[in-house]
Amino acid sequence: MICLFGTPLPSWWANAPGRIVPLSNDSGSITRIDSGPILMNEALSLPKFHRMPPRFPPEPSLARAVLDGAGLTHRVITVTGQGIAKPANLLVPVGVALSEVLDYCGGLTDDAAKIFMGGPMMGNTVSNFDLPITKGISGITVLAESQLDRRPERPCLRCAKCVDHCPIKLNPTGIAHAVKLREFELARQLNLEACVECACCGYICPSRIPLVQYMRSGKAALRQIDLANKDKG
Ligand code: SF4
Ligand code: SF4
């Protein structure tokens, strides 16, 4: 069942917060679909008749894809941060180069220091301005030097703040430790693959440990291990 904005919510929706979402299936990927509701952002789920601000034409959406067979050719993105001259919300064609978008927004400021595809917590830093805007990009964040925290990483304090703040109740410090030691199967047992890379753990860590980077590198290592095992048959 597809529920679009503006339609009455079905009764099971009210029970959605109590549902148990399986962490992973046999292939190791997350299967939220098994638990019933699927939450999508508005860029995908906006029906074609949704009224967007007048300067934006309605973008292709799930409704347009299902009803009209229209593909996703454009994306609304937010270009923001103190490092960009003229922050803006833009409707851009998928595939346009990052450099074109930055130029359109007046270019970088003199103290621009870091560019993220996405937000500063979940986004990836980029240095190649030729990279294209893909359909999964919701924004570009350009931080100025004054917005960066350059304090060095320090040893883990065992304060458990990362554990307390993980929205899916993982043990980020334990997983990061396993990844550092290249104990990837131990990290898998600690449900590394269920990590949604929200970066809350790294944000809250008083020791400035880049926990989400450990999550990402650990997941990449597990994918390599699984591929190698598959090749062996
Ligand atoms: S990045 Fe992963 S481990 Fe860290 S808080 Fe988010 S879900 Fe939990
Ligand atoms: S929040 Fe940082 S210092 Fe505290 S337990 Fe987690 S990794 Fe260690």
Image: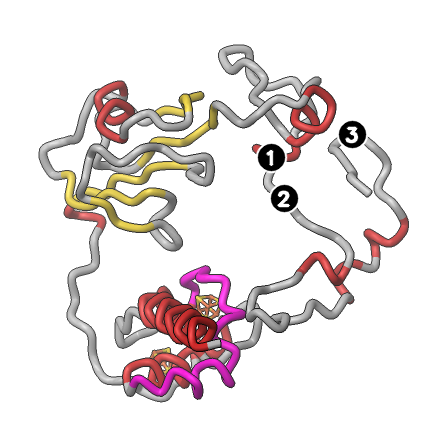
User: Toward which corner of the image does residue 182 lie, by quadrant?
Assistant: bottom left
Above or below for 117 versus 17: above
Compute the Cα span from label 3 to label 2: 15 Å
Looking at numbered disc 2 in the image, what kind of residue is underneath it?
Met
Above or below for 44 versus 17: above
Q: Position of residue 164 (x, y in %)?
A: 50, 77
In the structure shown, which secondary structural element does the residue marked by tag 1 occupy? helix
Above or below for 162 versus 182: above
Q: Position of residue 214 (x, y in %)?
A: 33, 72
**Residue at (48, 80) in percent of width and height:** 188
Compute the Cα span from label 3 to label 1: 15 Å
Q: Is residue 147 left or right of residue 197?
A: left
- In the picture of the structure, the residue carrying the numbered disc 2 is 40
Compute the Cα span from label 2 to label 1: 7 Å
In the image, which residues are magenta? 182-200
**Residue at (26, 49) in percent of width and height:** 125
